[in-house]
Amino acid sequence: MSDENDDRNRRRLESEELLERVKEEKRKVSDEGRPDAVERMHANNALTARERVAHLCDDGTFDEIGQLAAPGPSTPETVDWDRHDAPADGIVTGIGEIDGCPAAVGSFDFTVKGGSIGHTGFKKLRRILDLARNNGYPVVILHEGGGHRIQEGLDARPIAHGDYQGTFDMLAKLSGYVPLVSGIMGAGFAGPTNYASLCDYVPMVEGRGNMGMAGPEIVKAALGKEISKDDYDARFHTVETGMAHASFETDEKCLDSIRTFLSYLPRNATESPPKTNDQTPPPRSKVEGLLDVVPPDPKKGYDTHDVIDGIVDKGSFFELQEKFAQNIIVGFARLDGHSIGIVANNPRIKAGTIDVDVTSKGPRFISLCDAYDVPIVFFSDIPGFLPGPDQERRGLARHAGKFLYELGRATTPVINVTMRRGYGFGYLAMAGGRNANQLKLVWPTTEIAGMSIEGAVSLVYRDEIQNADDSEAKRQELVDEFSSRTSPLRATEDMGVDAAVDPRDTREIITHVLERTEQVDVDKLPPKKHGIPPI
């Protein structure tokens, strides 16, 4: 910082000299003026906060806001801090463009007080959130640090106001209006975790990223329990909690995934999802494979990804939460250039049943698609909800309604393709019947019934089977009889579905619907402030 005499004499200087002073201050707080800090990040195979912004945004489009911001000392420990003690107050903020779309971007600087955010930093973050609200910009926050700066936080005077400049409140208000992203680039305990919980896409960097409501030191002080930050790493949150949508080996790959995620969504909820002009149909071999990829025998498994690859534009499927609740598959794709969301059962994991983790993963994705009017295509092969005491103790009965709740309020086009089983409440949860508001298709391998045929026969005809001379033969006879009533031909007779189709024609039929369909008439919904989601 210029010394006090220079500030007092500034009126005696020429404009060019004053400009040079401003440039010099900017240089000192930039990567150029902080080579040691840059080297520390590079030594850990990480980009700096500014390098992350530069990689994410289109070249030359990022306009920084608050580069010369300084800490706002409020406690004796910080009273002498100035701009050089906490350059940019630990967060790079501004507006840039990502694939030509304006976005509000904030990137925490781990080399400044461990990436903690002070009172001025909160003002900077709130500033770009306000701009996102006013202009309908997506929000991307890149986290690495320890949340609220402790030296400024142990003071009731600022903290009594709560919500740190209203940043959490604003994120909640922006939810569903603009896409929200939290990239966990490194340490992410406390504040970063809280921000991530409100966002639509949360990627993590492997080996560096972690999340939790409290870090190891706080846990030890509060509970006397030793934990490692690695206990809550990318594997933990992509596999066990589902808090993170994906993990990546490097900063660059993590940032690239944010660009890909945003490419499927409109800038905000007032605009239509983007359509690309460079669509490539799936390979012919993949399309032909649809005819026999699904075995008629419900006891046999298959890879639902083969179904998806035979229908969507080549290489366009972007799967989310791939390692969490793998009995269901969700993600974005393109169909003849149209952005679509995909929800598909995965019979290779838990037979494709719906368990408690699936009720978290599936409905939230449905809600995300509906918020931005992205059509949703369901590929259904659902035997039902996973029974058993473990799931009941976890509250499966409480969570089961989430699918029906989100489908019932959806106004985006919803399409159902029943590939094989469509049993009971699970069929409804996968947009079977009236829950598909635009198109209902069945493949030749389809069976639709109130429950599993084998289970129903064993339950209702138990005595008859036990009293038969050949119990197994009698059981099979009954199964065959009822199987004849669950066929796709039977499903079409009373207009329960729109058509029974050759699987190879699925892509073309859905494309026609997407070209012809507008948003569902929201005026048909009853007047109310909002629904109350099942929890």
Image (cartoon, rainbow, N blue to C red):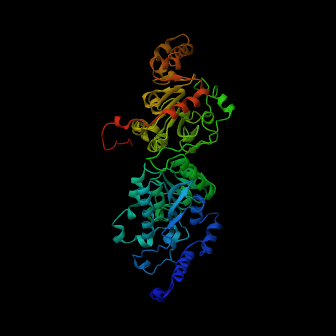
Residue drawn 59% across and 51% down? 257
Residue farthest top in this picture: 469
Q: Is residue 80 above or below residue 113?
A: below
Q: Is residue 251 above or below residue 295?
A: below
Camera-nearest residue between 300 and 251: 251
Residue drawn 55% across and 67% down? 110
Q: Is residue 316 above or below residue 208?
A: above
Q: Is residue 233 left or right of residue 152?
A: right
Q: Hey, which quadrant is residue 186 in on the image?
A: bottom right
Q: Is residue 27 left or right of residue 288?
A: left
On-image quarter of the C terminus: top left
The image position of residue 417, as x and y in percent, is 53, 29
Q: How many marks?
A: 0
Camera-nearest residue between 240 and 80: 80
Q: Is residue 500 left or right of residue 76?
A: right
Residue drawn 42% across and 67% down? 123
The image position of residue 100, as x and y in percent, is 55, 54
Q: Let me know if residue 261 appears in the view.
A: yes
The image position of residue 89, as x and y in percent, is 48, 71
Q: Let me know if residue 487 appears in the view.
A: no
Q: Hey, which quadrant is residue 307 in on the image?
A: top right
Camera-nearest residue between 407 and 174: 174
Q: Is residue 380 above or below residue 270?
A: above
The image position of residue 35, as x and y in percent, is 62, 74
